[in-house]
Amino acid sequence: MKKYYYVVLIILLGTINVYLTGYMVRSSYFIKENLVESMEFRNCKIRAKVLKDAKEMADKKNYDFSKIIAVNFLENNNHLTKLRLKGKNIKRTEKMYIQFSNQEYQKIYRGFASIFNDLKYFPVAKSRSSNYWIGYDNSFGADRNFRGAYKHEGCDIMAEKNVSGFYPVISVADGVVENIGWLPKGGYRVGIRSNHGGYFYYAHLSAYANIKKGDSVKAGTLLGYMGDTGYGAEGTRGKFDVHLHFGIYISTENYDELSVNPYYILKYLEDSVLYAEY
């Protein structure tokens, strides 16, 4: 009889162990619902060095750039200060996320793909003959006020030479001109939809280049010139210093255009600056 009880106890303990092990594994690869819409994701806190390392790995190993970012982002508690996973470990870990949280993992991956898979150049071209350049800080989410209070949904790239029409603004990615024209807040603006679905927004331009709505553009295409337009009726200028408001938006389950922080992305693109004659 005692032997029978021992057998039952062993089976019971084994079952509990299997359940607990499975629970712990599932918990390790659990992604909360719509993480892609949270400020954790939208802040896009990823060091430029990490993005460069991930891109180098993607090119060398023929991996998907955004899958490297997505898996490491999730494995680093939703930020990315270093690449914890490399090589086969990325594919192995991705399979676990797909097994236990596929729907939410795909949202995260698509979000990163729409941001990163088409990026090529910094949005302002640098002069070959002038030492004037730009500056910017992390102003995403800062308080702003025009016809009411709102949160800043991009980064302001400020002109060192405060002259409208001096700095060329270029497309950071291949895509299509989805919007062009005046907005009371953004002044003369251009919106480019990239091939992977990201929406790149350039505002306060002084003038446009030879582009129109529906045009296909390549990364590096001249869109216009940095200015100080906006905060009023069409043609309003001079309400603030010359700068480019640069924004990035993604499409999610609940938002057609959800802003993400361009600051760390701009840091990554600083090594991909085009030069121009001006």
Image (tube, grey):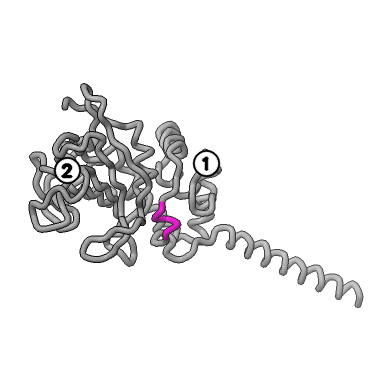
Q: Principal SS element in the magenta part?
A: helix
Amino acid type indicated by mark 1 = Lys
Residue in view at x 41 percent, y 53 percent:
43
Where in the figure is residue 202, as x and y percent of width and height?
21, 47
Q: Locate residue 80 relative to residue 257 in the image: left or right.
A: right
Q: Which circle marks residue 82 in the picture?
A: 1
Name which of mark 1 and mark 2 comes first in the sequence: 1
One can see residue 198 in this view? yes
Residue in view at x 76 percent, y 71 percent:
12
Residue of label 2:
227
The quadrant the N terminus occupies is: bottom right
Residue in view at x 15 percent, y 39 percent:
164
Classify mark 2: helix, strand or loop: loop
Q: Locate residue 254 relative to residue 230 in the image: left or right.
A: right
The quadrant the C terminus occupies is: top left
Of circles 1 and 2, the one toward us is 2
Where in the figure is residue 103, as x and y percent of width and height?
43, 62
Residue in view at x 40 percent, y 45 percent:
66
